[in-house]
Amino acid sequence: MTSGVGRSVAPALPSRAQHPPPYTAAAVSKETREALSDWFVVAGALLLFGSLFLTWSHQLSPSFLALFGSYGPLRGVPRDPTAWQVYSAADVCLAVLAAGLLLVALVGSRAGRPVSLFAAALGLAFVLHALSSPPTNGAANIFNAANSVPNYLPLSPGAGLGETVALVALGLAIAGLALSLTAD
């Protein structure tokens, strides 16, 4: 480039002031991290509690129902039960965990957060187990004598939406608790 007087001028390089330094966690204020972590924990607690009302196990496969759906002992078995219908104690523990997470996020002290993080990790382990081995609520075993070698038919339970929502909820709560513990 040339200027009006005949001399060459190099293009101006952007100064450091025009480009802020890259984002770091330290650049976010402690109050902002605390608020964000509390929102994560609140969302996780509410989702966890709500997941208990969703289907936690598809008790009987569609093919099984096609063959034996009208069989007498199966009439009282819920097809897609909630956590309240499948569990006797785990559902209550998850509800207490959801309430505890909500309390920690809204009024809890920093000292209670590591305990809540541990409890949420235990809840996560339970939900992962429920996903890999879907529960049944004691549905009847069906003996099929028509097979060449008579045996009991598998029930083939499958995981429901409740476990997936609980997994996401506990992930949010754990992320929020971990963020709040790093906000020092």
Image: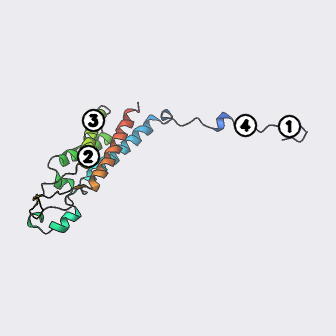
Name the residue located 24 percent from the left edge and 55 percent from the top edge: 158
The span from disc 4 to disc 1 (Cα, nearest Å) is 15 Å
Residue 143 spot, x, y in % from top left: 9, 60
Among the two numbered marks 4 and 2 on one chain, the one whose residue lies closer to the N terminus: 4
Among the two numbered marks 3 and 4 on one chain, the one whose residue lies closer to the N terminus: 4
The span from disc 2 to disc 1 (Cα, nearest Å) is 69 Å
Residue 8 numbered tag:
1
Q: Secondary structure at mark 3?
A: helix
Residue 98 spot, x, y in % from top left: 26, 46
Name the residue located 22 percent from the left edge and 47 percent from the top edge: 95
Cβ–Cβ under 8 Å for marks 4 and 1: no
| Lateral position of residue 30 relative to residue 63, left or right | right
Residue under circle 3? 118
Residue 146, compared with residue 129, is above or below; it is below
Residue 13 numbered tag:
4
State the quadrant of the N terminus.
top right
Name the residue located 8 percent from the left edge and 62 percent from the top edge: 145
Among the two numbered marks 3 and 1 on one chain, the one whose residue lies closer to the N terminus: 1
Q: Is residue 90 visible?
A: yes
Q: In the rendered image, which quarter is residue 112 located in? A: top left
Residue 176, compared with residue 85, is above or below; it is above
Name the residue located 8 percent from the left edge and 67 percent from the top edge: 72
The span from disc 4 to disc 2 (Cα, nearest Å) is 55 Å
Callout 4 amino acid: Leu
Q: Classify 10 Å Cα crowding around label 1: few (below 14), some (14-19), many (20 and above).
A: few
Callout 1 amino acid: Ser
Cβ–Cβ under 8 Å for marks 3 and 1: no
The span from disc 3 to disc 4 (Cα, nearest Å) is 52 Å
How are the colours assigned in the image? rainbow
Residue 127 numbered tag:
2
Residue 86 spot, x, y in % from top left: 17, 53
Which one is in front in this view, the residue at disc 3 or the one at disc 2? 2
